[in-house]
């Protein structure tokens, strides 16, 4: 297997740890351990009782039940916990796909969802979200890409990096297309609960036998450093994941699973404050973009906390982003990391004062560019 480099991770490796102001992230403002303990009631003595035994290949049974009840159809046999959704997604892709399989992927998109299937030798058919249509997905564009040769349709809505979203009606149309073709629908729901104009979509695994849901603490929950994610899938797919995991991570650490269970039991305490903050930040972002005139073209996200504005006049935003970081201390992601070089990814899920200051500096940098 030959994986191509992931330019987003290369960019973050260079800049993330030294940024003065980070308005690049696709996640909400992160929580501290003290906040996690206050919200969940986990006490130091609860941690002291833990013995560092090995864990279950598919996850702690009680935790699988919590996940099944909250994010699936109630059947814990369809759940596997993971070291971030990245692990779950790569395990499922490796289980289901092989050389010659056809896979539909969305562009622009997060590298794991686009490049991993290619590395497994699959033929990728691209569902493009057109910038000129504000990245609005059209199921009519997907339809000709799906046939009886399609093994999997890999989706992520609300979408990173654009914030584009599907309606429930459109989700059901996608499921109908997949069902006709016998294809799996892999649904990366990292941002499911971060929606502004409509209620969250139902899990695809509750709509379709071959629907597979992925979830994570890294985005809406504000706990990326916990590295916890999960997958809800048919038991045969979960079995396939275990066969691969037996050679790699074996299981999720019991300490992480202990904290994960407590977080899921108190999920609204994590999700609701950050959704409120993201909602008001989104309004700030819209106002800021309106004030930039023709220097910024923004399609306002329907979900998630990432926006993907075009900077007209910049054919490739990389030099600008580099200068923005070095001279103004502000981190954003060049669109080239997502195959759309005229754009930048802006994260609006962080602390409001940071966002306001970051946008102000970004506006000044744009007005002065080329420096
Ligand atoms: C769309 C999407 N899916 C999956 C991931 C991986 O998340 P994690 O492995 O932290 O759960 C990311 C991280 O940025 C993402 O943006």
Image: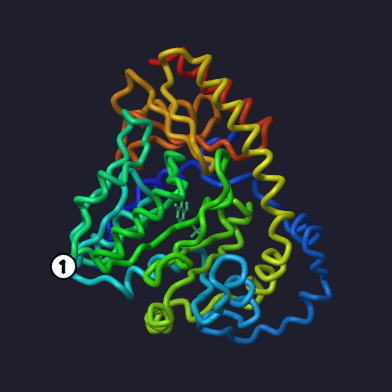
Left or right: where 148 falls relative to 199: left
Q: Residue at 57% of width from left, 36% of height from top?
A: 348
- Front in this rendered view, residue 144 or 117: 144
Left or right: where 309 falls relative to 153: right
- Front in this rendered view, residue 251 or 276: 276
x, y percent for residue 220: 59, 51
Quadrant placement of the C terminus? top left
x, y percent for residue 263: 69, 64
Q: How many marks?
A: 1
Please tell me in which quadrant of the rendered image residue 114 appears.
bottom left
Colour scheme employed for the rendering of this structure: rainbow
Q: Which residue is mark 1?
A: 100
Please tell me in which quadrant of the rendered image residue 205 appears.
bottom left
Q: Residue at 48% of width from left, 71% of height from top?
A: 232
User: With respect to residue 207, does 79 lie above or below?
Assistant: below
Q: Residue at 28% of width from left, 60% of height from top?
A: 3
Decide if residue 187 is in sight here.
yes
Decide if residue 371 is in sight here.
no
| Tag 1 secondary structure | loop
Left or right: where 337 falls relative to 277: left
Instruction: Characterize the local packing of mark 1: few (<14), some (14-19) or many (20 or more) Cα atoms within 10 angstroms.
Output: some
x, y percent for residue 202: 51, 58
Left or right: where 133 falls relative to 101: right
Q: Residue at 80% of width from left, 75% of height from top?
A: 46
User: With respect to residue 198, does 113 lie above or below?
Assistant: below
């Amino acid at each position: 297997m030959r994986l191509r480099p992931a330019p987003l991770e290369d960019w973050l490796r260079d800049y993330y740890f030294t940024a003065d102001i980070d308005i690049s992230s696709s996640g909400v403002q992160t929580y501290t351990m003290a906040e996690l303990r206050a919200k969940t009631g986990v006490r130091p003595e609860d941690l002291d009782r833990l013995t560092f035994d090995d864990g279950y290949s598919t996850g702690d049974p009680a935790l699988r039940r919590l996940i099944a009840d909250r994010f699936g159809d109630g059947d814990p046999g369809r759940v596997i916990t993971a070291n971030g959704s990245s692990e779950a997604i790569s395990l499922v892709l490796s289980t289901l796909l092989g050389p010659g399989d056809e896979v539909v992927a969305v562009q622009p998109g997060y590298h794991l969802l686009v490049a991993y299937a290619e590395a497994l030798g699959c033929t990728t058919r691209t569902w493009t979200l057109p910038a000129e249509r504000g990245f609005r997905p059209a199921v009519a564009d997907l339809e000709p890409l799906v046939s009886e040769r399609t093994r999997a349709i890999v989706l992520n809505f609300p979408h990173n990096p654009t914030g584009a979203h599907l309606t429930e009606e459109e989700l059901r149309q996608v499921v109908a297309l997949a069902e006709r073709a016998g294809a799996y629908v892999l649904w990366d729901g990292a941002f499911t609960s971060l929606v502004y104009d409509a209620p969250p979509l139902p899990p695809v695994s509750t709509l379709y036998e071959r629907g597979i849901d992925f979830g994570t603490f890294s985005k809406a929950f504000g706990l990326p450093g916990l590295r916890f994610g999960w997958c809800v899938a048919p038991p045969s797919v979960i079995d396939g994941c275990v066969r691969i995991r037996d050679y790699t991570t074996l299981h999720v650490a019991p300490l992480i699973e202990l904290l994960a269970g407590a977080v899921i039991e108190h999920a609204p305490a994590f999700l609701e404050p950050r959704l409120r903050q993201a909602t008001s930040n989104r309004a700030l972002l819209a106002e800021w973009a309106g004030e930039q005139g023709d220097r910024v073209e923004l399609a306002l996200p329907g979900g998630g906390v990432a926006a993907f504005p075009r900077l007209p006049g910049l054919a490739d935003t990389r030099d600008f982003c580099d200068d923005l970081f070095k001279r103004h201390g502000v981190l954003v992601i060049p669109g080239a990391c997502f195959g759309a070089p005229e754009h930048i990814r802006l994260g609006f899920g962080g602390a409001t004062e940071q966002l306001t200051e970051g946008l102000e500096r970004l506006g000044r940098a744009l007005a002065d560019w080329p420096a």
